[in-house]
Amino acid sequence: MTADIKNVNSYHGATIQGWTESESMQFLAFQASRHQKCVEIGVWKGRGTACMAEFACGKVWAVDHFMGSDDERDTNHTQARDDRDGLIAEVETNLRPWLDDGTVELVKLPSVEAAEALKEHGPFHFVWLDGTHTTEALMADIDAWKPLIAKGGLLSGHDASWESVQAALNDRIPGWVHVNRNIWMYPI
Ligand SMILES: C[S@@+](CC[C@H](N)C(=O)[O-])C[C@H]1O[C@@H](n2cnc3c(N)ncnc32)[C@H](O)[C@@H]1O
């Protein structure tokens, strides 16, 4: 079935386990259809990545150390703690068509290291932050990735309702705005 960007239920990403809800899936698809060079921090099993890949007009660098988030390793991310190889095998299966055709490149590194490793491919046009949601970790992600975004590009991320997320945004990018309850954005 060919996916229809207006119908999230038709997306391949909708079949993949993860925490990206419908509005964010559609937001990612829409941004990837309009921005050539996209980066996602926090892939897990590729739910959000697949939404971007399926509608991408360019390339998606998908960054995850597959070790789980510091604050969720013993709750939501136990598979990363107990079976990292199995988790990576699952994400590679889920994203197979786009890994094979080069639409997606999986970058198995911590976010800040990945920014250093990928900066030669920038500037990027859309960066989505959905890694660790502690204030310190999100501030580090913003510090690492914001300088790599082209003028006219978009820095954005998930879980905008979390207090820890808002604390990082208020500190680093005070002009940020809500797209909806879950999504924040900061045009560059
Ligand atoms: C909330 S999950 C991502 C969910 C995913 N976007 C989805 O659509 O389901 C967070 C992911 O970020 C990864 N992560 C957390 N901190 C990271 C960091 N500093 N560098 C790279 N990956 C990180 C974790 O391993 C985990 O897979």
Image (cartoon, helix red, strand yellow):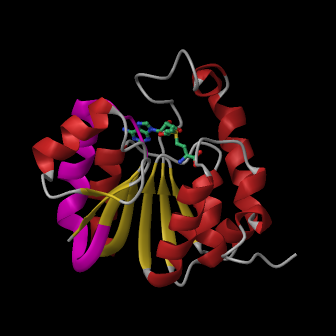
Q: Which residue is drawn at 60% across and 49% down?
A: 21
User: Dividing the picture into quarters, in which one does residue 77 lie?
Assistant: top right
Q: Note whether residue 185 is visible.
A: yes
Tell me where the magenta segment starts and ends, as one range: 130-154
- Tell me residue 130's x, y (percent): 43, 46
Left or right placement of residue 148 versus residue 158 in this view: left
* Front-most of residues 58 and 3: 3
Seen in the picture, residue 76 relative to 21 is either above or below; the reply is above
- Tell me residue 184's x, y (percent): 34, 54
Q: Which residue is drawn at 65% across and 45% down?
A: 45
Q: Is residue 44 magenta?
A: no
Left or right placement of residue 83 versus residue 118 in this view: right
Seen in the picture, residue 1 relative to 46 is either above or below; the reply is below
Seen in the picture, residue 45 relative to 40 is either above or below; the reply is above
* Front-most of residues 167 and 47: 167
- Tell me residue 1's x, y (percent): 88, 75
User: Dividing the picture into quarters, in which one does residue 135 lie?
Assistant: top left
Left or right placement of residue 16 versus residue 77 in this view: right
Q: Does the magenta stretch include residue 143?
A: yes
Q: Residue at x 17, y 50 (%)?
A: 143
- Tell me residue 7's x, y (percent): 72, 70
- What residue occupies the far front of the structure in this picture? 181
